[in-house]
Image (cartoon, grey):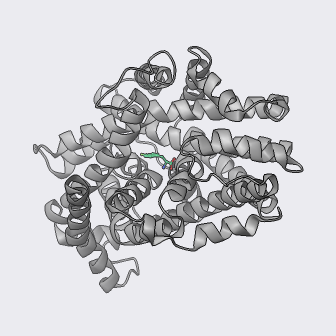
Amino acid sequence: MARKPRETFGSRMGMLLAMAGSAIGLGNIWRFPYTLGKNGGAAFLLIYVIMLLFICLPVMISEYLIGRRGGSNPFRTFDRLAPGSRWRWMGFIAVLASACILSFYCVVGGWSVKYLDDACSGRLMGYEGDYAQFFGSFISSPWKPLAYTLLFLGMTGLIIAFGVRKGIERMSKIMISVLFVIIVLVVIRSLSLPGAVEGVRYMFVPDFSKVTADTCIAAMGQAFFSLSIGCGTILTYASYVHKDENIAASSAWIAFFDTAFAVIAGLAIIPAVYAIALMNGTDPDVSAGPGLVFITLPGVFQSMPLGGVAAVLFFLALLLAAITSAISLMEVVVAFIIEELHRSRMRAVLLSFVLCGGVGVFCSLSFGPLEGFRLFGLSVFDFFDYITSNIMLPVGGLLLAIFAGWRLRRANYLDELTNGGSLKLPRWLALTIYYLVKLVAPLAISLIFLNCILS
Ligand code: PFF
């Protein structure tokens, strides 16, 4: 029986929005503002942008390039590009990393479904007690968060079941466009509150006294997580991209869009937190950790005019952002199952659902019945968050850089970047990218790790 030809993205715009959809997610709206808050505001932003330009962007270009050249799931791609070597196990680990991320990601995705549901029904704004209690009693109850987690994962699976063009590309296009409009509306509302300017100042005036070795690892982890690099999602999406695509330009565009979105999401949240704290005569708590979005913000919405509408829009934005990223994670696992275990797309989706949902159940329960259970001193949820973002993704990035810089031939790398010379990428720029990947990125990632281990 003839094999079906491999699917591809239908248009350049669709491909860019799908990749941007993977990058823009909870990392931008949920993780970025509180990581920024904890690490000195603008000082963190500055380090973040430096990491992005000199380490993450070159690694992203390489992951893209490897994916397009290999034209398959991570496991097979490495096997094709380095036949018979151990590199294919690096591909396999990337598939595992994606599954691990999805397992805790879907828990927070589930929370956003619950909050959207409550914002629409008026339960959220009508709540009269303390939001820490509201959030705490929800996440620690055994069944409710589980149901929302599985619902979120189910929605993700449903989109993927429709395939690359009809599912991933079409939904990413719609969702990212809606997301952008919504977040701009929320920013306007947030910035128009009296006292909001204090929050803007906090974001853009650096406080270097909070910068430590941990800040660098946090910035690097955040950049890898936010750009979705190091665990095969860019690689897998790139395998659906046409050969005439300008890899460097697309990557730069996605990185820019992702960073701009993180800053915009910060502008939607931090100035509002400042303004309302000022109004209530309390201290603004922008470093409240994961609770910032689910505890501090509902209180902020409750205190501001038109807050009910802002809450619905905000949690809808959070959900859309989470889903477009979750589909990219699940697609890595699905592509692997389809191509290596020879299952249909539908079965592959079901299998991924069972696998990630199974681990997701433990992540979700770690806020309630399994709270006392620790892995290396961390709850199951924190364990998966920490080892994936701060270890697996940067190590994945390190190995990708080593593969691209030392295993691929320089001529092939440059050839892929310039489409055999037909694309007008200045040679000095192509060479700079190549040497950043070959020398700077591996060295910098290793040094940051070393510094963190020793400090
Ligand atoms: N980039 C996504 C976010 O910012 O939420 C999360 C993510 C997606 C991380 C895909 C890694 C990944 F492979």
Residue 48 vs residue 427, the one in the foreground: 48
Q: Residue at x 26, y 38 (%)?
A: 93
Q: Position of residue 69 (x, y in %)?
A: 30, 56
Residue found at the far right of this picture: 305
Residue 346 vs residue 298, the one in the foreground: 298
Total numbered circles: 0
Q: Quadrant of residue 435?
A: bottom left
Q: Residue at x 73, y 33 (%)?
A: 130
Q: Is residue 423 left or right of residue 299?
A: left
Q: Is residue 69 visible?
A: yes
Q: Is residue 353 visible?
A: no
Q: Eyeballing the image, is 223 above or below 386?
A: below
Residue 91 vs residue 268, the one in the foreground: 268
Q: Residue at x 33, y 56 (%)?
A: 63
Quadrant, the N terminus: top left
Q: Position of residue 241 (x, y in %)?
A: 44, 54
Q: Position of residue 98 (x, y in %)?
A: 38, 38
Q: Is residue 398 left or right of residue 214?
A: left
Q: Position of residue 389 (x, y in %)?
A: 38, 46
Q: Quadrant of residue 351?
A: top left
Q: Is residue 85 left or right of residue 273?
A: left
Q: Is residue 187 left or right of residue 147?
A: right
Q: Eyeballing the image, is 72 above or below 282?
A: above
